[in-house]
Image (tube, rainbow, N blue to C red):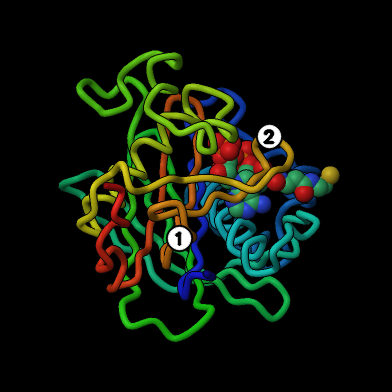
Amino acid sequence: MKPDVVLGNDVVDLEEPRSAGKAADRRFVARVLAKVEREGLDRADDPDLELWSLWAAKEAAFKVVSKLRGTPPVFEHDAFVTSWNRTTSRSSMETEVRAGIVRHGEVRVDVSVLHRAGVLHAVGHTHRAPAADVAVQVGLGRLDDAGAPWAAGLDELLRRFTPREADAIHSLASAAVRLGARRALAARAGVEEHRLQIVSRPGTTGRRPPFVLLDGREAPADVSLSHAGAWIGWALWSHPDFGLAPPPDTG
Ligand SMILES: CC(C)(COP(=O)(O)OP(=O)(O)OC[C@H]1O[C@@H](n2cnc3c(N)ncnc32)[C@H](O)[C@@H]1OP(=O)(O)O)[C@@H](O)C(=O)NCCC(=O)NCCS
């Protein structure tokens, strides 16, 4: 079952040492930004922030396009072209949100990029079909968040997954983000978490788009996962009818 809403998300750890000063690397900028984006970078008050916001938006859109096509396109960053249309500051929470569109050929992905101290979180979505409810739910956390559901070692976390889920997991962050997303989806859809699985088809480690199973069957929902440094982020959508069917009778 293909979900009506298709999601992508990307986290950028701004404290990663290689992030600082990257906007001055003209070869990198020429490779990843389209002309119109480079012009925006030249006008930006904070060029590094502008560069990584564009990067995060493109990566989120790449994930959307991969899922729409059923196979990833060649990732030529400059073929994903971003235009911002809004910036909202919420100074009390030290956050800023930019909103815009990333175009890739005929595909148009709505994106928003949250900037909070030390991190960017981009979320993109597009529609495969008109959806009754397009509210996308996002989550952002850190591996060292005290009391989080993922606050444990990898061996302990792996015990909380089915073999099919665990097949795609390759690191602590990879496990943590799936736990965070699975729990959030259970709460959003009002189903018991043990009925849900976040799985991937066979493929190259780290290049396998995730999807959702409910009681072992593909569900009318979508999920996107990202991890960078100590940060994990996810985006979720579920159809309003998700989980209305009772669980299969296992007795
Ligand atoms: C998708 C991609 C851009 C994400 O890379 P990243 O920023 O390092 O990783 P993130 O943490 O943001 O995202 C990873 C998650 O995205 C998901 N994902 C991976 N590939 C995906 C895809 N094509 N579409 C949607 N989701 C994808 C997985 O859930 C993955 O989680 P996992 O590693 O725990 O399995 C990268 O995997 C990729 O495919 N790059 C393209 C490389 C390419 O085409 N090169 C061609 C030129 S040589």
- Report the disc number at residue 4: none
x then y, percent, for residue 1: 52, 69
Residue with the mark numbered 1: 222
Q: Residue furthest front?
A: 251
Residue at image position (31%, 77%) is 133
Query: In terms of depth relative to the viewer, which is nearer, 44 or 230?
Result: 230
Callout 2, which amino acid?
Thr
Q: Is mark 2 within 8 Å of ligand 1?
A: yes
Callout 1, which amino acid?
Asp
Q: Is residue 22 above or below residue 126?
A: above
x then y, percent, for residue 182: 35, 44
Image side of residue 9 versus residue 170, left or right: left
Residue at image position (45%, 52%) is 216
Q: Is residue 81 above or below residue 91?
A: below
x then y, percent, for residue 193: 28, 44
Pointer 1 local density, CA inside 10 Å: few below 14, some 14–19, many at least 20: many
Residue at image position (62%, 62%) is 67
Q: Is mark 1 within 8 Å of ligand 1?
A: no
Residue at image position (55%, 55%) is 60
Pointer 2 local density, CA inside 10 Å: few below 14, some 14–19, many at least 20: few
Using the rendered image of the protein, determine whether residue 23 is visible from the camera's viewpoint.
Answer: no
Query: In terms of depth relative to the viewer, which is nearer, 96 or 59?
Result: 59
Q: Quadrant of ligand 1?
A: top right
Image side of residue 226 versus residue 97, left or right: right
Of the numbered discs 2 and 1, the one sitting upstream in the chain is: 2
Image side of residue 84 versus residue 196, left or right: right
Label 2 residue SS: loop
Query: In terms of depth relative to the viewer, which is nearer, 218 or 189?
Result: 218
- Report the disc number at residue 205: 2
Label 1 residue SS: strand
